[in-house]
Amino acid sequence: MVTACGKPPGGVIMDFEDEADLDRLLWKCHATFERTEAISGHGRYALTAKLFPEELYPGVEFFDPPRDWRGYRAFAFTVYAPDAAGETLHIRIDDNPDDRDFEGRYQGYVKLTGAVQHVEIPLDEIRNQPPQGPLSLGTIRKLVIYLYNQDKPRTLVLDDLRLVGP
């Protein structure tokens, strides 16, 4: 749920406690998504994404993320990738969904350990990283968490995607 001013209640982007959260994912071939109790960074459920190597960028794209990230300090989430230790998790955040230019978006990286990891990225880093100029935190349009060019199926468990307060 997004409030009238565009900020998610309590900063939660998606926590998978509601089955309707699955409708807020962009479904593609070569991936399956389900709510699971495997791990949980918050509440009872998390998302398990089974990703297959037929896709060059296998991952999870969130349909219509909250647009206004101003007033928050960081973007955070929990990830568990038991069969991807040593792989790099990519985090893509765009303020223009039509811009395919790598230089105009935030592109973050996390080295996966195979254990449960709590990731927190300062919004100053997200805003200031794109070489073409600052990302507009008031007009976020795309959020994607993915792997790159995998040679075998992988499992990503994601939970508690949220914006952390000031």
Image (cartoon, helix red, strand yellow):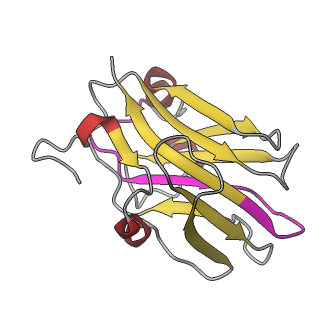
Q: Which residues are magenta?
A: 134-155
Across and down, in percent, residue 108 comes to 62, 37
Query: In which image quadrant can residue 103 be found?
Result: top right
Look at the image and tell me in which quarter the C terminus lies: top left
Residue 38 counted in the magenta span: no
Question: Farthest residue in the top direction?
Answer: 166
Question: Farthest residue in the left direction?
Answer: 4
Residue in view at x 42 percent, y 39 percent: 162
Residue in view at x 12 percent, y 41 percent: 5
Across and down, in percent, residue 82 comes to 81, 52
Query: In which image quadrant can residue 17 be found?
Result: bottom left
Instruction: State the residue in front, 109 or 13.
Output: 13
Residue 141 counted in the magenta span: yes
Instruction: State the residue in front, 76 or 122.
Output: 76
Q: Is residue 39 above or below residue 121?
A: below
Residue in view at x 62 percent, y 76 percent: 32
Look at the image and tell me in which quarter the N terminus lies: bottom left
Decide whether the magenta segment is chiefly helix, strand or loop.
loop
